[in-house]
Structure formats: structure tokens, C-alpha cells
């Protein structure tokens, strides 16, 4: 009988912080129209970086066109506008509406870098 430890040892895939770490995951996505990404803990930079890299690859390689987040709508709307090249915000000022708890979930380097990438990606496509 296979123990849980044996199964993990035989099937676990190490994550080394490289984009190729997620190749098998992207293969499993196949042609699915929806992918849900959770996280094991809020505020962990490593999870935010992983989620960002996976999301970038879903957009670039699988053609995903929407990112839906759990956030206060008015605050997130400003980021959405920035990501679509609308309004006069800078990347920094687009986060200014996130003033209440849990602002650290949004006002951090990993999310800022992803939103900056998303705006550039959308601009390169001619808007979104």
C-alpha cells in the first residue's frame, strides 16, 4: 500500500522560482475557460509572486482575458481603470484608494509589479 509520504515523494514537483515550474500546471489547464487561483495565506510574498507568474502565463499562453479578484469594488475599480489605460493615474497612485484593512494585501511590491505588467500587456494589445 502506498503511504501519503510515498505518494508525495513520487509526485511532488519542486518550485524553484522559475517560470517553467508551472509548465505541468499550464498543461493541465488545457482549453478550460476558467481557472481559479487561491492561496494558502494572505500576505505571503511567495504566494503573490507565484500567483502573478501563473496569471501572466494564463494570459500570454492560454489567451485568458479577465482577472477577477476578491476586493472592495471601488478600490479595485481604480486599478482596473489603470490596467486598461484609462484615467490619469500612475501605477503608484492607482493604489491610493486601498486605505483600509487589509491594504497590505494590495499595496505591496508583488501586486504592484503585476498591475504594471498587466497595463503594459494591455497597451501592447492596443487597449483591453
Image (cartoon, rainbow, N blue to C red):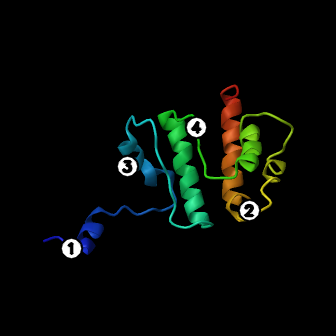
Q: Which residue is mark 1?
A: 3
Q: Residue 64's spot in the image, x, y percent?
A: 52, 35
Q: In what element is the residue under mark 2? A: helix
Q: Is residue 125 positioned above or below 116 on the image?
A: above
Q: Nearer the viewer, residue 11 or 93?
A: 93
Answer with the quarter of the image where residue 46 lies.
bottom right
Q: Which residue is mark 2?
A: 103
What's the distance in space between the residues labelled 1 and 4, CA to CA? 40 Å
Q: Are marks 1 and 4 in contact (CB under 8 Å)?
A: no
Which residue, given by chain and number where applicable, does mark 3 sit on? 24
The residue furthest left is 1
Earlier in the chain: of badge 2 and badge 4, it is 4
Q: Position of residue 114 (x, y in %)?
A: 66, 49
Please report contact status of discs 3 and 1: CB closer than 8 Å, yes or no. Answer: no
Q: CA distance from mark 3 to mark 1?
A: 24 Å
Circle 4 residue = 66
Amino acid at each position: 500500500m502506498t503511504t501519503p509520504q510515498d505518494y508525495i515523494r513520487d509526485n511532488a514537483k519542486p518550485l524553484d522560482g522559475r517560470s517553467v515550474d508551472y509548465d505541468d500546471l499550464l498543461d493541465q489547464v488545457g482549453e478550460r475557460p476558467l481557472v481559479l487561483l487561491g492561496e494558502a495565506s494572505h500576505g505571503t510574498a511567495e504566494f503573490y509572486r507565484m500567483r502573478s507568474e501563473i496569471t501572466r502565463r494564463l494570459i500570454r499562453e492560454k489567451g485568458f482575458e479577465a482577472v477577477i479578484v476578491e476586493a472592495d469594488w471601488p478600490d479595485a475599480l481604480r486599478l482596473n481603470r489603470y490596467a486598461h489605460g484609462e484615467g490619469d493615474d500612475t501605477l503608484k497612485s492607482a493604489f491610493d484608494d486601498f486605505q483600509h484593512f487589509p491594504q497590505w494585501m494590495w499595496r505591496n511590491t508583488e501586486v504592484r509589479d503585476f498591475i504594471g505588467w498587466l497595463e503594459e500587456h494591455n497597451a501592447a494589445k492596443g487597449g483591453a
